[in-house]
Image (spheres, grey):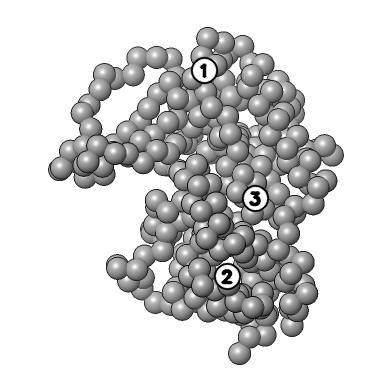
Amino acid sequence: MVTEEKLAGWTGPSSPTEKDKQERTERMIREAIDAHEGFDGYRNDFSVYAKGSYANNTNVKSDSDVDIVIECTDVCYWQEYDPAKGGHPAGSPYTGPWTPEKLRAEIAAALEKKFPGAVTAGSTAFEVEASSARVNADVVPSFQYKLYFSDGTYRQGTKVFKKDGTSIVNYPKLQLERGKEKNVRTNGFYKKTVRILKRLENELVAKGLTEEVPSYLLECLIYNCPEEYFSRDTWRGTMRGCLAKIFNSTMGREPDNDRWVEANGAKFLFHPAQKWTRAQVHKFASDAWDYMEFE
């Protein structure tokens, strides 16, 4: 049985040594972008910031990679939530130099100069290999994105183009904002519970008792759990409630009126384009429940 003492030990963030490596990695990537001559004349049009588990302080040692966004704000891609109603007038087409191809090329050159032999170009992001002084990093070339509503307000995110020309929209800053808000409402127990679930998944995978589940998905699962679960007297009580909720909510077809969302609160968690499925999550929740020896 996973004891209360062990769960309490799983609530903490990365160790000071690991945190130093993460911060050093972020700093070195910023330095690479700042020093690259390809961005001369446009430095005010780029925003470099961390996203994901590292930025949200929900990462654990086994998932300590750093995700860094290089966002070009010289370009703004946008669309309307409901085009039939309208919400934003069309502007002039962008005529500047920053195409998805050019952005990828300049970021690649900047990283390869700073980290020779340690950069791999993936379909979406560039991976910078870890060393004794830094952790693995994913660097994501992005553009500013706005989703306009019929009242003229908008939701701001990023648009990321893959090498094959397809694109996805992310909301990294909303994830950070929503996570902070939920953590405050739960007196700090939300992020501690996320760390417990991530460490529990790591242990199950290491013992061959479940299939690997993406770190971001684990955070989203806890994000969708009722906040009253985080005020229970014990960590076993909190995990019992969360695992039961995850198991029951992923059983069968998802109801249209109760769809789960990502930790940014802006995108549905389950849909055909996702790289995970409800069945995968349901099986993981069952495996975790059994390992915790809940009845």
**Mark 2, mark 3: which one is toward the viewer?**
2
SS at badge 3: loop
- The disc labelled 2 sits on which kind of residue? Phe
> In this figure, which residue is indicated by the disc labeled 1?
44
Distance in Å between CA atoms under marks 1 and 2: 42 Å
The answer to whether residue 212 of the structure is visible from this angle is: no
Q: Amino acid at mark 3?
A: Asn
Decide: is 195 above or below 266.
below
Q: Earlier in the sequence, mark 1 or mark 3?
A: 1
Three-letter code for the amino acid on which mark 1 is drawn:
Asn
Position of 210 with respect to 145 (left or right) is right
Residue 57's label in the rendered image is 3
Q: x and y percent of residue 160 in the render?
A: 46, 36
The quarter of the displayed image where residue 94 is located = top left
Circle 1 or circle 2, nearest the eye: 2
State the CA–CA distance, disc 1 to disc 3.
28 Å
Q: Secondary structure at mark 1?
A: helix
Q: Residue at x 55, y 78 (%)?
A: 241
Q: Quadrant of the C terminus?
A: bottom right
Residue 250 percent coordinates (x, y): 45, 73
Mark sitting on residue 230: 2
